[in-house]
Amino acid sequence: MVTTDSGGTVTEWDERARTLLGHPRAEAVGRSAGEVFGEQVSHEVGEALQERTLWIGTAPVRHRDGHLVSTWLMAKRQEGDHGTEWLLSASPKAGPLAEEDRTLAEWGFNRSPHHIGLFDTDMRAMRVNVAFERAAALPEDQIRGLLPSDIVVSEASPQVDQAMREVIETGEERQVDTYARVPGESAEHAWSIALAPLTNPEGVVCGALLTASDRTKHYWARRRLQLVNEAGSRIGSTLDITRTAQELVDVTMPSFADYVAVDLLSFIHQGDEPPSGPPAGPVRMRRTAMGSVSSEFPDGTLHPGDPTDYPMASPVAEALARGRPAMYEITESALTHWAVHDPERATRIRLYGAHSVMAVPMRARGVTLGVALFARKESPTPFQSDDMLLAEEITARAAVCIDNARRYERERQTAVTLQRSLLPQSLPEQAALEIASRYLPAGGQAGVGGDWFDIIPLSGARVGLVVGDVVGHGIQAAATMGRLRGAVRTLADIDLPPDELLTHLDDVVIRLGAEDFAAEAETTGDIGATCLYAVYDPVVGRCSIASAGHPLPAVVRPDGTAHTLDAPIGPPLGLGALPFETAEFDLPEGSLLALYTDGLIEARSHDVDAGRATLLHVLDCPEDSTPSLDDLCDDAFAALLPDRPDDDSVLLIARTRRLDEAQVATWEVPSDPAAVAQARTDAVRRLADWELDDDIRFTAELVVSELVTNAIRYGLPPIQLRLIHERAVICEVSDASYTSPRLRRARVFDEGGRGLLLVAQLTQRWGTRYTPTGKTIWADISALTG
């Protein structure tokens, strides 16, 4: 290796240059290239490098002792820090091959690890090396004169012939990647075949060179890596146990195995805690997923979902007991051994024809979940140790995903159970509304949410309807929902109007958020919720509604007019912002009132407006048809919700009823103690007209007497008495005072103070509700109907 600067002076001279030309480095460096190599060579190279950057040729170079050395030279012009430099390379082997060199080249041809063959223009073999002979299982003298497709017969042979023909015709190289079975072996090999033209000095194609490399190990290594990557992307796409198991089957079949099955221990499907330690005794499992390249299965009639038992001496039970994968060659002796403990399964395996089987335990986080079974039948290659490592890695990925799905399903079932226990278990008895309801928890990865509804009987035959939605999902949202539902019921029991109820509920949410924040709860102190509260009065056919950030109800009137109520919507609960407002609407008898959560009308497939329009379309039925409310609920869910909704959905549909005028009696009572007797008489007469039994009339007469007396004595005029005949009797006395009555314990010699105590003992419920003009004391005597 010699370098010269832009002036032609030698700047570098290595030991190999000294060996070739005899000049020591100290003598060569600093002299001109012409003095070292000869003026003719130096001049020829200098002229050539003025037009191009590379020159190659042979020239005689004088040795230090004076004789000429035939040398091969390569000069390359490079841009350096000191101008143009020459890079000169000389080889003492330039020129014709010596006899010993020919022998070495022959050895290299024959002993090359690559399979090399020389073919003439008729594609007939002329020469092949030893590796080619070994792959073809034929000696060279029997290979000569054969076509490529005659030497190795496979499905890809015509492809190789065609490629070689193109090489000879076009003079261009070709590359063929194919699979062929080496004679004497059962497994196919992956071959990378390079075809190049052989040309004479005039450039005429005289034949073709075939070089084949066995890339089987690289091929399978790449295939295994691809399978691992595919398993990582395809397995665990959902939190569904069955689907995850089937994804393991789909990924590994048919590229890895001809038959794959996943059996999981029963505790997974039952939602129980995992057992401690390895299974003891026969292992009861459940087939979760399976697949085969053909219509035949070694398990006979076993289907996904069916239970299956494995004796302790079976390969599956042994693999589970050891906690390590097991690989078996299906030989007659192995089948005979298995038949002793499990004759039916051994017979089915023999009929199926599998020749290689693996049982890989599925374990995640120290818990044994089940086993994955792999079998090869069509593929002639038995499972190898690398295959077992690959199956173990893929199965471990699937096991983690199945365990995640198991844990998610357990938490989801816990949340669903908690939420359903907090929702109404049955519709309360009331005559104001015909009601049907539906609740569907979220089916996606979000989990169950905090949607709820309630039907609350109120005084005066009225009914309160509640629909709410807590932000978030999981057990925390369900627990928060239960707390808010209890608060709504408590506030409704004191007969607060809708706007006041939501105002108090807003305070409750703010307080709960502060308590959770102080306790460092998972909610981080923020509890978001929406709620809608509606009160329907069947006596006057009026509905009062207030909303805290919740969608307004849909209404369908008896004439078929369908629309969404137009009412103000306040801020969501927990903000303590603007006040809430109550809106009142008259609803004719037979109207439909639909309350819902946003999970019903909002989905990925449509926006809120489209969902609301679909709901109105479902509710708007022809006038000559009166579908049941349960059918309407089912139709709405079918039209609006996918199979696995992303959010909880609640739908509450009510058909309004009106109490007949004959069921309500009202009297104005003078503020005079003498008017009590007349009030009792009027009440008893009306009770007789309603044909109520004597016990109810006696109790009602006593209650009317006590309530009217208290209103005259402690209240302010005007005083009004109203009886409502719903399921039994509701007695109401109203006056203009806002002073609330209260129970007190009368002493033995007190002449009064026992009226309200007597009323409380004789009625099912009693209470006070406030109105814009005063208060109303009411008592429900319906408990005496039995």
Image: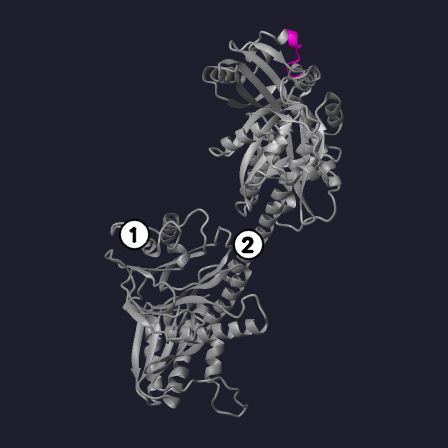
> Which quadrant does the N terminus fall into?
top right
Q: Secondary structure at mark 2?
A: helix
Relative to the observer, which residue lies in front, 721 or 563? 563
Q: Residue at x 52, y 24 (%)?
A: 175
* Residue at mark 2: 412
Is residue 567 at least partly visible in the picture? Answer: yes
Question: Which of the numbered marks, if any, corresponds to residue 617?
Answer: 1
Q: Where in the figure is residue 336, as x and y percent of width and height?
A: 75, 23
Graded by Cα atoms within 10 Å as few (under 14), some (14 to 19) or many (20 or more), the crowding at tag 1 reads some
Q: Residue at x 37, y 84 (%)?
A: 708
Tell me if residue 99 comes above or below residue 674 in the rendering. above
Relative to the observer, which residue lies in front, 250 or 613? 250
Q: Where in the figure is residue 41, as x and y percent of width and height?
A: 57, 28
| Residue bounds of the magenta highlight | 134-141
Q: Residue at x 62, y 30 (%)?
A: 37
Answer left or right for 60 relative to 438.
right
Answer left or right for 524 relative to 496.
right
Q: Residue at x 30, y 64 (%)?
A: 565
Q: Secondary structure at mark 1?
A: helix
Would residue 137 be counted in the magenta stretch?
yes
